[in-house]
């Protein structure tokens, strides 16, 4: 009897252990098969001090000065005036055009605001040589400098090398506006920076045309104003509220101009067909691109090939 009781307890214990093991195994498989949910919100990109934070002093090598070894501190140079700092992480043609446009306005308002453009580089010598060759294409309205702190820039600024331009607008030693631009566009991004500058110097926000930017039709053949709105919609750093606002403005235009609606739909359809939709803008912007493509340029259904008739054979 005693042996039977021990055997019964052992059997019960083994059965319970097996059940627990199977349960844990099933739960583990279930958790592995469950995929993490994708966030529908676009991640905000940060670079440099944020609004309200201090603008630390730093020193850079001045380009095109009287003394080839001259350095200057853009913050000290401002002398208490509002200041605009442009950090160039990567040199591209659109970025240089945006910088030149902004710098021209800063030059016009130099009695009220100070500015500086700072190039970040891993190879200062190569950058100096390039800047000398490209001098005519670079802005001449504000001081240009090269950071001696490498591609990361001044350590106290916490800059993000993954963006193309970091533009900081400040006053009284603190940041008032921060623009971290991954793919800078003069038509899309510069007006916002100009507005931030005007908040300090007063007056009206200048038009891009008054700063020498000539409107041109986009590659998709869209009118300049429509092309600008589409670029605003698909901006990588566009906020959901801004995407919604721009989308509503475009849809109001579509209602009055069917030809424009069809053009935008065709652009969306080409993007979808190419398989590159995920590379455009934020998730919300992609929802609108697909919506307009489906509405104004529906995908053509592929017709099924007719079955081939078998040749008749003489019997």
Image (tube, rainbow, N blue to C red):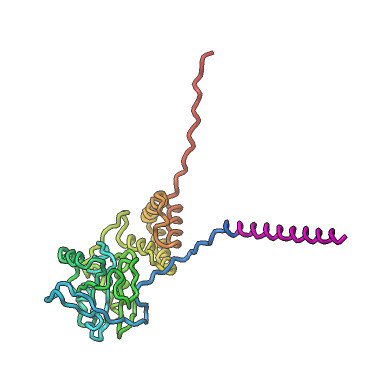
Q: In which quadrant is the N terminus drawn?
A: bottom right
Q: Where is residue 57 in the image (x, y as percent from the top left)?
A: 27, 82
Residue 204: x and y in percent read 27, 77
Q: Residue at x 47, y 66 (%)?
A: 41
Q: In this view, does 140 lie to the left or right of 300?
A: left
Q: What stretch is highlighted in magenta?
A: 1-30
Q: Nearer the viewer, residue 133 or 13?
A: 13
Query: Residue drawn at (53%, 62%), measured in percent from left and top?
Result: 37
Q: Residue at x 15, y 66 (%)?
A: 132
**Farthest residue in the top direction?**
315
Which percent across, then down, holds residue 65?
14, 75
Compared to residue 76, the image places residue 274 above or below, namely: above
Q: How many labels does the image show?
A: 0
At x 20% / y 82%, what residue is drawn? Answer: 111
SS assignment for the magenta stretch, majority: helix
Residue 98 to residue 199: above or below = above
Magenta region includes residue 12: yes
View extreme (right): residue: 1
Left or right for 94, reference 297: left
In this view, 43 is above or below 175: above
**Is residue 115 left or right of 295 when viewed as pictured?**
left
Is residue 109 covered in magenta? no
Residue 281: which quarter of the image? Answer: bottom left
Residue furthest to the left in view is 66
Locate the C terminus and report the quarter of the image it occupies.
Answer: top right
Nearest the eye: 266 or 255: 266
Q: In which quarter of the image is residue 190?
A: bottom left
């Amino acid at each position: 009897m005693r042996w039977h009781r021990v055997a019964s307890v052992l059997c019960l214990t083994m059965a319970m252990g097996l059940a627990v093991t199977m349960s844990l195994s099933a739960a583990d498989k279930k958790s592995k098969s469950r995929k993490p949910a994708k966030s529908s919100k676009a991640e905000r990109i940060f670079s440099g001090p944020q609004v309200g934070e201090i603008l630390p002093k730093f020193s850079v090598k001045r380009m095109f000065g009287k003394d080839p070894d001259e350095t200057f501190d853009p913050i000290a140079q401002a002398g208490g005036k509002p200041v605009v700092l442009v950090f160039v992480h990567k040199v591209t043609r659109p970025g240089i055009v945006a910088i030149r446009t902004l710098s021209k306005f800063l030059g016009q308002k130099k009695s009220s605001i100070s500015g500086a453009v700072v190039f970040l580089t891993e190879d200062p010598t190569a950058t100096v040589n390039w800047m000398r060759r490209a001098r005519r294409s670079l802005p001449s309205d504000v001081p240009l400098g090269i950071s001696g702190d490498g591609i990361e820039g001044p350590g106290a600024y916490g800059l993000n090398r993954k963006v193309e331009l970091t533009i900081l607008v400040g006053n009284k030693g603190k940041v008032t506006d921060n623009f971290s631009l991954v793919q800078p566009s003069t038509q899309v991004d510069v007006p916002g920076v100009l507005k931030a500058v005007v908040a300090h110097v007063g007056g009206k926000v200048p038009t891009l045309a008054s700063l020498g930017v000539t409107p041109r039709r986009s590659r998709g053949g869209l009118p300049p104003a429509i092309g600008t709105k589409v670029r605003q919609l698909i901006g990588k750093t566009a906020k959901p509220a801004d995407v919604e606002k721009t989308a509503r403005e475009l849809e109001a235009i579509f209602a009055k101009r069917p030809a424009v609606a069809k053009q935008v739909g065709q652009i969306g359809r080409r993007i979808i067909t190419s398989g590159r939709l995920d590379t455009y803008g934020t998730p919300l912007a992609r929802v609108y691109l697909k919506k307009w493509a489906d509405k104004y340029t529906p995908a053509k259904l592929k017709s099924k090939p007719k079955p081939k008739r078998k040749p008749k054979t003489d019997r």
